[in-house]
Amino acid sequence: MSDVSAVKAALKSQVIETPSWGYGNSGTRFKVFAQPGVPRDPFEKMEDAAQVHAFTGVAPKVSLHIPWDKVADYAALTRHAEGLGLRIGAINSNVFQDDDFKLGSVTHPDAAVRRKATGHLLECVDVMDETGSPDLKLWFSDGTNYPGQDDIVARQDRLAEALAEVYERLGDDQRMLLEYKLFEPAFYTTDVPDWGTAYAHCLKLGPKAQVVVDTGHHAPGTNIEFIVALLLREGRLGAFDFNSRFYADDDLMVGAADPFQLFRIMHEVVKNGGLRSETNVNFMLDQCHNIEAKIPAVIRSVANVQEATAKALLVDMDALVAAQTSGDVLASNAVLMDAYNTDVRPLLAEVREEQGLAGDPFAAYLASGNQERIAAARVGGTQAGWGA
Ligand code: LRH
Ligand code: MN
Ligand code: MN
């Protein structure tokens, strides 16, 4: 796409969903560092998300994690979000923090535990009904630590049974997003370890089941953009959980560890129609900001996704196709690298200024005084639940 106004229009229409847990205290299993001014409840998490949206203009949706964001009145939380110019995004289930789930949740060998786990997933659909959320996001920590611990295929059968029950419960405008992760907390087998397993389950379930690509959930060296291209081709790329990894599931800011990988992913997204609203790819962040200030870190992350998207939109597709067709390997690669090496920050500043925003959202937020205001007003902020 070389027409600048089309590039700008695409950048203005991209929506990036931010995670409620990114605003709370978080850490590793070694330590949770408490920060001043973190939200004390899900309502205050919405206020922080609204700050990110106010400065970036592209982050009007917030993912919830249940029960981390459990409230007595979801309609009230939804109204609060809407009053701040936000809407509720994906509802994330949590079947990984209960003693009963030590040997698995929906794949547990005991039917009573499986019922409890499926019950939680169905409750999450209730929360979708109450909040208007269109997406149920499922991640299972289920797996085994030792060879022989359980039957691999029996666990797949139990998983399929639970997913089918939850799929049946979805309304016409609701979909199921199934996330995979290579390992952790299970170390020998994981029941949904890769895109192929997630895709196989989604195919059996039906068109409302799609795959989530969490960029931190692969083995080192995995070609994530290939997975993205393939899932888009099959119409089964439901969403991203964006973050960065150096070693495992680090949950660092997206675009921090490997901006070139993020560009390659966004090139496949742009090239294969993933930015079009009808394709309905949900661009979510799934990050924790353990040692850095949270709201500015989310703003930086949103900007990193926008920069990768802008570079992908600048790829000269005519030149690329011509070079590819003529078999010119070096010219094809040069077309991509030209786009990647473009400094898109001035373009993004223009895009924001045209929307009445500051060109540099990060600096504008720091100058706004909000960080000092919330530090003074909120005492005793809560933990996200993650890394507890
Ligand atoms: C699992 C995961 C999943 C959870 C989130 C908190 O590692 O990526 O998306 O819901 O972290
Ligand atoms: Mn994730
Ligand atoms: Mn993760």
Image (tube, rainbow, N blue to C red):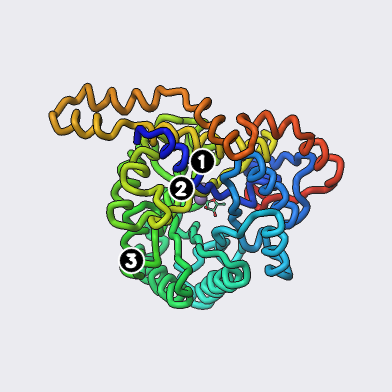
Q: Position of residue 383 (x, y in %)?
A: 71, 50
Camera-nearest label, 3 or 1: 1
User: In this image, 19 relative to 365: left or right?
Assistant: left
Amino acid type, mark 2: Asp
Q: Secondary structure at mark 2?
A: strand
Say above or below: 207 vs 346: below
Circle 3/circle 2 CB separation < 8 Å: no
Q: Which residue is mark 1?
A: 243
Of the numbered discs 1 and 2, the one sitting upstream in the chain is 2
Image quarter of residue 54: top right
Question: How many angstroms separate mark 3 from mark 2 (CA)?
Answer: 24 Å
Q: Position of residue 180 (x, y in %)?
A: 42, 54
CB of mark 2 near ligand 2 (< 8 Å): yes
Of the numbered discs 3 and 2, the one sitting upstream in the chain is 3
Q: Secondary structure at mark 3?
A: helix
Say above or below: 291 vs 207: above
- Residue at left offset 74%, top offset 57%: 43
- Residue at left offset 35%, top offset 64%: 202
Question: How many angstroms separate mark 3 from mark 1 (CA)?
Answer: 31 Å
- Kindly tell me whether residue 113 is visible in this rendering: no
Q: Which residue is mark 3?
A: 153
Q: Which residue is mark 2?
A: 214
Circle 1/circle 2 CB separation < 8 Å: yes
CB of mark 1 near ligand 3 (< 8 Å): yes
Camera-nearest residue between 168 and 278: 278
Amino acid type, mark 1: Asn
Q: Position of residue 13 (x, y in %)?
A: 49, 47
- Residue at left offset 56%, top offset 64%: 133
Neighbor class of circle 3 (other Cα within 10 Å; few <14, some 14-19, many 20+) is few
